[in-house]
Structures are given as C-alpha cells and as structure tokens.
Image (cartoon, coloured by chain):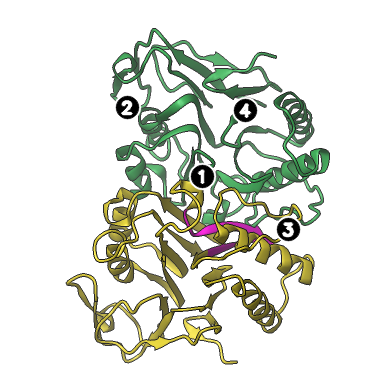
Chain colours: A yellow, B green
Amino acid sequence: MCQLLGMNCNIPTDIVFSFTGFATRGGRTDEHKDGWGIAFFEGKGVRHFVDHQPAMSSPVADLIKRFPIKSKNVIAHIRKATQGQVTLENCHPFVRECWGRYWVFAHNGDLKNFAPLLDGAYHTVGTTDSELAFCYLLQQMRRRFGDTQPPMRELRAFMREITAEIAQYGSFNMMLSNGEALFAHCSTKLHYIVRQYPFATATLADEEVAVDFSEVTTPQDKVAVIVTEPLTTNESWTQFAPGELKVFADGDLLPD
Amino acid sequence: MCQLLGMNCNIPTDIVFSFTGFATRGGRTDEHKDGWGIAFFEGKGVRHFVDHQPAMSSPVADLIKRFPIKSKNVIAHIRKATQGQVTLENCHPFVRECWGRYWVFAHNGDLKNFAPLLDGAYHTVGTTDSELAFCYLLQQMRRRFGDTQPPMRELRAFMREITAEIAQYGSFNMMLSNGEALFAHCSTKLHYIVRQYPFATATLADEEVAVDFSEVTTPQDKVAVIVTEPLTTNESWTQFAPGELKVFADGDLLPD
C-alpha cells in the first residue's frame, strides 16, 4: 500500500515539516520504495515533481525539503507498487486539465476488475488502476456538469457518488484538488488535523524534528493536513470513517 | 521574446551542458527574466519543472544543472513576458494528454487577434496566447484524426498545416513533443545541430565551459539540439528558414 499526504491552507504555507517526516517513509521507516511524487498549486499553476527513485534517496525530494515552496493545496504520494511497473508515468500524483483548471490526484489502494470505458476525453498514459480511476472520474464529472464547474455543493455530492462507485472495486483512499478545494476519500485509512490559533509545538513521528508553529504562523492561519498515518506524536489526529469523503477549503473542513 | 531549447536523441542523454548555457540567458547574458521551464520525457512519463523566478537564480534550475536527468526528448523555455502575467500557470512548457501520451509545448513569439474557439476538450489555465495556441492545436489534431494517433507522415503534414495557420497571427516559433518525436516550427529564428560520431569538443557561448563529447558518448549516439540562438561558438549550426517545420526522431532530422 502507498501513503498519501495532503495539505490545504487559507494562506500559502510550506510543507517542508510534514514532507520531511512523510518522505522518510519512502525507504527508511517504511517500505514504500517504488517512487514518489508531490504537486503544489501556486494560484492556478502547478509545480509537479515525480520520481521513481525512493523518496529517501531522491535528489528531487531533497530539493523539496530545502526549498520552501508555499502553496494552499499540496498532494504528495509515496508508492508501493501493486499494479503497474515502477516507471515515471506510473508515479502519482497525476495531473489533468478540466474547466480551465489543473486537477491533481493521488490514490492509495488497489482496484480489482475495474475497467470502465474511457470515451476519449481522458486517456491513461501509464498502466495503473489509479490513473484509470482518475481519468474515469474526470470524464464522468464533465459528462455530468458539461463545460462549466458547478457550485461546491453539487461538486461534493458528485464526488461522494463517484468515489463510492469506484470504491466498490477495492480500496480507494484518494486525494484530489483543483487548487481551490481538496477532496479526500477514505476506504481503509486516512487521518486529518486542522492546525489553527493558538499554535503549539509538533514533533515528527518519523524524524527527530520538532517545530513550534506559533513562531512561523499568524493568528489567522489555518492549515489542514490529511495523511494516511498521523505524522506527529503529540497532536490529536482525527481518523476518517471508511467510505467517508471530506472536503477541505481555506484550511478548514467544510461542514456537511 | 523568449528563447527555446529542444533536444531529441536516440538514447537517453542529459542536457546539463546545453541547459547551463541556456539558463544563463535567463537573467544574466540576456533579458529573459520572467520565468522559465523545462520538461523531460522518460519513456512515456514527463518530469516537468516550471518557475516564475529567473532561471539564473532559481533553486530548481540549479537542481537541473546538478542532477543529470537522462531523456530522449527535452523542451526548455525562458520567458520574456509579452502577453499574460508572470505567474506559474503562464510558464512554458505546457503539458496536456492526448491519445494516451503527454504532449509538451513551448512557444516563442507573439500572436495578435488570435482567438480560436475551444470546444471544451482543452481549455487554457493561464492567460497566454501560447497556451491558447497549444490547446487549439491539440483540439484540431484530435478533430482531424479522431481517437488514435496517425502515422508520422500524416501527423507531420497536419503539423505543417496547423503551424502555418497559427503563424498567420504573428510570430510562432514553437517546439512540441509527445516523447517520440520533436516538432519544431520557425517563424523568425531557430537553429539546430545534429551531434554524432566522430564527436568533438564544444565550447559554450554563454559560460566558460567546454565539453569533449567523445568522452561521454558512444559511436552510436545521435543528439539533435534545436535552439533559438546557437549555444556553442565552435560548431556549425543550421538556421531554419522562416515558415519551416522540421521533425526530429531518434536524434536525427526526418527527411522530407
């Protein structure tokens, strides 16, 4: 199984602290050695880094840890291959365009006998069940709403429906963002935390690193972090229920 | 005006030497300070780096110069903004998927009154004439050939036609690759060289760097480099004629 990390904030924030702990799982504290990737939205633009080297030893991962890219929406993934070879085109997250925005997607899990028909709007480039699920999701989204993005309420209802449909084929923990909101669906395991004022010190579970967020934030900041396994040992993470889809915007969980 | 750099090879080759000279034009030996980008194909996968900082001072550009990514098709761009703000979503190259392959595109020039109708298959995310031309080109390509990539002869004939059509609106020096071939169209300025056995030493025009290619190649290697202005002072570059489209595959110019 792979691991997922997402961040959604109300002001552009760097993910160096969380990524440092997360990347350690890519080859050292965990067995996810089959590549990794991360995508940062900056406005409507995306910085997209993928690598089929383990995150622990990748020069690109090293850059991410040293170069504080500030973003309101980030999705990262470390891969333990279940389907598809260890090649660059099979590394998550995947990026496609819809409605004049980039959409970024990463998946943890394994879909069996999942073979929807793609009508040509979105094709897979690699050979993973994950990219197929992403292409299918975008295709169905465009088919439902036509050429214009609908209001969030309708988009969320659609995401609940489509993720439940795909999850019938297996495990479908996934994160998806268009740079405005971050959608997270849990089949088996996902946790989140919303950090906000008053900020405290957090200690990484995977590295001997602690950070006092009160020194690097303002009282207005809100940062939601969503991850397969909690990243810190001294904070209170909330576990998703199986089948749950949550939407984060401006650093907060949107109320149902 | 921006500058373009492309490389097409028969075996994966690193572009460190050429990129080092090219990136120097992004803020030091030339005025192209409004961001830059580079995309490397690895098989069907793409590593895509964009930055709205000048290439000379970008930590990402620094990584590219130190980390020899080997690729058979590379397209790089340094930007002097003419249309569209200096934001990440306006940095070239742009990437879209068609026929189960990523397509990478970069443009140097300025299109006036170019406002084709996009039918929804490809939308622009940013505000440049360049991304609009790319979306239009892919849309027309899919409209012409349907859901399957045609043979190269037909694809090249289409590219000649569509680049000539777009070039009616202004200057359209562009590079496009699907990871198999590299298409280069010249409106005003483009040069190329094919390096092959026997390899010699080349000296960069923009940095005090020389490399003896005979030490880093095998006799079978072929490397085509296409660039706005010649990168080296002691090699013989061929200038494109205005209106010319050339196709490079496996490190060589395809015969007409």
Measured Cα–Cα span from mark 2 to mark 1: 31 Å
Numbered tag placed on residue A234 in the rendering: none
Q: Are marks 3 and 1 on the same chain?
A: no
x then y, percent, for residue B189 = 60, 24
Q: Residue at x 32, y 53 (%)?
A: A54
> Residue under circle 2?
B207
> Quick check: is A92 in the magenta stretch?
yes
Q: Residue at x 52, y 21 (%)?
A: B251
User: How dense is the environment of label 4, judged by Cα within 10 Å: few (below 14), some, or many (20 and up)?
Assistant: many
Q: Quadrant of residue B220?
A: top left
- What is the secondary structure assignment of the residue under circle 3? loop
Measured Cα–Cα span from mark 4 to mark 2: 26 Å
Query: Which residue type carries mark 1?
Result: Gly
Q: Earlier in the sequence, mark 1 or mark 4?
A: 1
Numbered tag placed on residue B45 in the rendering: 1
Q: State which region is magenta.
A: A91-105
> Residue under circle 4?
B184
x then y, percent, for residue B214 = 32, 14
Query: Which residue type carries mark 4?
Result: Ala
- What is the secondary structure assignment of the residue under circle 4? strand
Measured Cα–Cα span from mark 3 to mark 4: 34 Å
